[in-house]
Image (tube, helix red, strand yellow):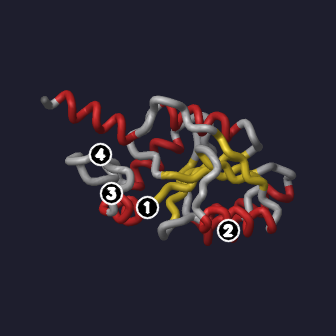
């Protein structure tokens, strides 16, 4: 079973892992209402190294994104449904996850620049977002490998919420 840790604890562990020759893989996301797509993504990520660290998006960033219309079904509940500490606890209980940590801000970039994992896992296809490309380039320049894992078709938290709302009709 994994552990929920602070950012500073994780940074201190990183030195130990590096000395031991362990490859560190980082995946980040919201992970609200865990579903099979999340599990398969994390299991695949785990297979890319020795230690899987999952960075969990904080509640304020999710609320801000939801307020802008990204990531919430129409007329659905505000997101996140599950608070970050609970999402971290659930993720840490998964066999594939070694460490779960909540990151501050809208992007894990700052924390990743300090942690410098060996592999950063991104779900989905290549993004046309210039900021995402710039961040990936910065991390690759530090020696991080970027691995893209396709999303599992048919699984999304938004779709899960929509199905739950349909049950109320």
Q: As drawn, is 100 to the left or to the right of 14?
A: left
Residue on which disc 3 sits: 69
Q: Residue at x 69, y 62 (%)?
A: 136
Q: Secondary structure at mark 3?
A: loop
Residue on which disc 1 sits: 58
Q: Give the Cα distance between marks 1 and 3.
A: 17 Å
Q: Residue at x 66, y 35 (%)?
A: 44
Q: Give the Cα distance between marks 2 and 3.
A: 24 Å
Q: Give the Cα distance between marks 4 and 3.
A: 8 Å
Q: Quadrant of residue 63?
A: bottom left
Q: Up-down: is 73 above or below 66?
A: above
Residue on which disc 4 sits: 73
The image quadrant where one finds the N terminus is top right
Q: Up-down: is 169 above or below 136?
A: above
Picture coordinates of residue 48, whole percent (x, y): 75, 41
Q: Secondary structure at mark 1?
A: loop
Q: Nearer the viewer, residue 146 or 81?
A: 146
Q: As drawn, is 17 to the left or to the right of 131?
A: right
Q: Is residue 11 visible?
A: no
Q: Give the Cα distance between marks 1 and 2.
A: 22 Å
């Amino acid at each position: 079973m994994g552990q929920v840790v602070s950012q500073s604890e994780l940074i201190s562990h990183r030195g130990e892992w590096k000395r031991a020759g362990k490859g560190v893989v980082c995946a980040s996301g919201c992970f609200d209402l865990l579903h099979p797509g999340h599990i398969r993504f994390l299991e695949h990520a785990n297979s890319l190294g020795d230690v899987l660290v999952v960075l969990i998006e904080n509640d304020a960033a999710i609320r801000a994104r939801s307020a802008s219309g990204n990531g919430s079904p129409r007329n659905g509940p505000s997101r996140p449904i599950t608070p970050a500490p609970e999402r971290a606890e659930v993720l840490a209980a998964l066999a594939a996850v070694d460490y779960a940590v909540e990151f501050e801000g809208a992007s894990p970039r700052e924390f990743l620049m300090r942690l410098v994992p060996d592999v950063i896992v991104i779900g989905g296809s290549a993004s046309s977002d210039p900021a995402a490309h710039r961040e990936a380039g910065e991390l690759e320049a530090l020696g991080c490998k970027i691995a893209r894992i396709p999303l599992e078709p048919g699984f999304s938290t938004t779709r899960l919420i929509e199905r739950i709302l349909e049950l109320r009709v």
